[in-house]
Image (cartoon, coloured by chain):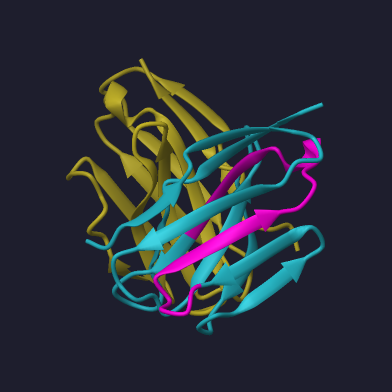
Chain colours: A yellow, B cyan
Amino acid sequence: DAGVIQSPRHEVTEMGQEVTLRCKPISGHDYLFWYRQTMMRGLELLIYFNNNVPIDDSGMPEDRFSAKMPNASFSTLKIQPSEPRDSAVYFCASRAGPGYGYTFGSGTRLTVV
Amino acid sequence: GQQVMQIPQYQHVQEGEDFTTYCNSSTTLSNIQWYKQRPGGHPVFLIQLVKSGEVKKQKRLTFQFGEAKKNSSLHITATQTTDVGTYFCAANTGTASKLTFGTGTRLQVTL
């Protein structure tokens, strides 16, 4: 298995632009999570899905952030419009179910200038 | 919301020395997981502890879950340069599906 696949690995964009991050979870994993990591705030859970349905989006910072999971093998996290404070590493993770460990993707390093 | 605190934030050891990081919660945890993140990398799952007082070992790493299930520790015996990274504990908060990560302990090992 190729693991959790995220794209792009790096993204540099100008403030105000739309950014879309992509994730392919491990086949058969029913749960998908989006985390954001910064030095100041550590690893923050943004949103998670179970069987493609968003369960908890309480960590999404504001309306500029949205996430979708149209099918079991694909999810997107969109930021529109982007701001410099959105600069962070965004991780996608999946797991088979409660009680299992998370498998993280390699992350997308987002820089908004 | 529930917070999971780790201490220390940072530790620098000489290769061969031991290292311990501690994870503390104000509430009882159903289970706890540990992850390692190498510099520039992503968190990698190490282990899960479920039972009160549970102790698990992985080579030089020893993981312990407190009797009251409010704290946990990771101990590394005779550190090596390959142990460099940040170690996170993580616990379920609210539902069984949602993990909250601790603040992490960054370990630096020098020769």
A110 left or right, relative to B86? left
Residue located at (26% from left, 60% from top): A57
Foreground: B81 or A24? Answer: B81
Residue located at (39% from left, 71% from top): B70
Q: Give the x, y percent position of residue B97.
A: 41, 74
Residue found at the very far bottom of the displayed protein = B51
> Is B28 in the magenta?
no
Residue located at (47% from left, 38% from top): B9
Residue found at the very far left of the displayed protein = A63
Q: Give the x, y percent position of residue B12.
A: 63, 31
Residue located at (58% from left, 48% from top): B87
Question: Magenta segment range?
Answer: B66-89
Q: Give the x, y percent position of residue A107.
A: 55, 42
Q: Is residue B16 visible?
A: yes
> Is B86 in the magenta?
yes
Residue A60 against residue A1 in the figure, above or below: above
Residue B49 against residue A13 in the figure, above or below: below
Work out which quarter of the rendered image holds the N terminus of chain A and state it: bottom right
Residue A8 against residue A85 in the figure, above or below: below
B51 left or right, relative to A39? right
